[in-house]
């Protein structure tokens, strides 16, 4: 019999993984995301009911399905694909009555219900409300988490998207934090698809080669320098790129990050996102270059030629004045 709780849990996990993958890809894929999240929720609701008895998810008005669910389908030669089961709303009603408040109350008839509205809208009309995408996922999570406890499944259900799951549950979570988790989830998926099949030893060699080959020299905002840091998504070496300058008090070359880019997993984070990471990448970074080497990339500005008044007693130009006579190559 295919009406099996374990099979339905696996199906729910598969649909939710696909939902989060689409959600991580951003607005163009959100329709697929909310649809798949709704299906995942329905399958887990049914998994719980089937764990009590398979008959609890079949259409009570369809006799052949009742026979099949009770293990007597051979009387009418009923095939599993012919059974009729209840829809999301009815499955929710039945579970809500059994668990008595352990899952959020279903909205009254006629009131908006993000889980069903989004799934049905995409399935039957190819439309969902973009403003409701986060709410759909939050609603699904609040239903699924207590069901996982009842089914003794555990948080491994969420897989690599546990971080995004946690962010969505934070009340009043900023959109920027959710977007960050979406980017990280997508990057982890890209990494797994590209390199997950390679054994660890060979993978390190491949990633080192990739990082060396594809990391470019940046010439943005007059900056020739970037800092190599560990990627927060795949732990490979990525690049922080920003504005550099000389800290005259410490006499070191420093860079203020503007964005991060990893060419292994395709993660790119903007300035506003760098500080949201658990290990912030927003702080200034000391570059491994001497101020003397740094200033060797400067050229005299014809408008700032030094005159004799800027020279010291020994006839040498004052160093700070000399720096003002130089500018970056563009």
Image (spheres, rainbow, N blue to C red):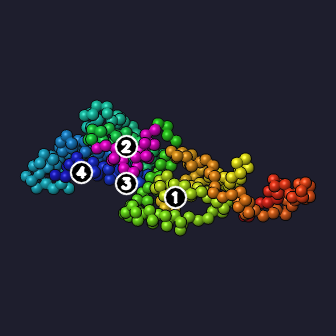
Residue at the spot 82% in from the left edge and 57% down from the top edge: 322
Work out how far the residue at label 2 is from the one at label 1, CA to CA, in angstroms: 35 Å
Q: Can residue 26 be seen in this view?
A: no
Instruction: Looking at the image, tell me whether mark 4 or mark 1 is earlier in sequence order.
Output: 4
Crowd band around label 2 with a 10 angstrom C-alpha radius: few (<14), some (14–19), many (20+): many
Q: Name the residue under label 1.
A: 237
Q: Nearer the viewer, residue 259 or 224?
A: 224
What numbered label is drawn on residue 7? 4
Instruction: Write the start and end of the magenta stretch as one range.
Output: 153-170
24 to the left or right of 145: right
Crowd band around label 4 with a 10 angstrom C-alpha radius: few (<14), some (14–19), many (20+): some
205 to the left or right of 119: right
Mark 3 touches mark 1? (CB < 8 Å): no
Q: What element carries label 1?
A: strand
Q: Residue 228's spot in the image, x, y percent?
A: 56, 57
Q: Nearer the viewer, residue 244 or 130?
A: 244
Residue at the spot 49% in from the left edge and 52% down from the top edge: 232
Mark 2 touches mark 1? (CB < 8 Å): no
Considering every residue shown, the one lying at the far top of the view is 100
């Amino acid at each position: 019999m295919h009406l099996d709780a374990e099979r339905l849990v696996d199906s729910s996990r598969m649909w939710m993984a696909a939902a989060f993958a689409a959600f991580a890809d951003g607005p163009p894929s959100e329709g697929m995301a909310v649809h798949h999240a709704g299906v995942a929720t329905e399958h887990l609701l049914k998994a719980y009911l089937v764990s009590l008895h398979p008959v609890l998810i079949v259409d009570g008005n369809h006799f052949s399905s009742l026979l099949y669910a009770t293990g007597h389908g051979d009387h009418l030669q009923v095939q599993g694909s012919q059974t009729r089961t209840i829809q999301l709303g009815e499955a929710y009603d039945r579970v809500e009555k059994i668990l008595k408040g352990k899952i959020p109350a279903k909205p009254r008839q006629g009131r908006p219900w993000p889980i069903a509205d989004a799934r049905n809208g995409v399935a039957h009309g190819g439309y969902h409300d973009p403003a409701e995408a986060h709410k759909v996922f939050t609603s699904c999570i609040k239903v699924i988490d207590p069901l996982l406890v009842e089914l003794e499944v555990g948080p491994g259900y969420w897989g690599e998207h546990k971080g995004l799951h946690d962010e969505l549950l934070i009340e009043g979570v900023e959109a920027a934090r959710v977007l960050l988790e979406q980017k990280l989830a997508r990057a982890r998926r890209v990494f797994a698809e590209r390199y997950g099949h390679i054994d660890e030893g060979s993978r390190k060699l491949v990633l080192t080669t990739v990082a060396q080959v594809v990391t470019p020299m940046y010439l943005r905002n007059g900056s020739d320098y970037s800092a190599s840091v560990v990627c927060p998504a795949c732990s490979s070496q990525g690049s922080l790129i920003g504005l550099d300058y000389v800290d005259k008090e410490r006499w070191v070359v420093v860079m203020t990050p503007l964005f991060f880019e990893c060419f292994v997993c395709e993660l790119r984070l903007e300035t506003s996102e760098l500080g949201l990471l658990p290990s912030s990448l927003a702080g200034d970074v000391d570059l491994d270059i001497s101020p003397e080497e740094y200033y060797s990339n400067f050229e005299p500005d014809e408008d700032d030629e030094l005159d004799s008044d800027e020279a010291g007693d020994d006839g040498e130009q004052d160093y700070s004045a000399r720096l003002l006579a130089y500018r970056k190559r563009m």
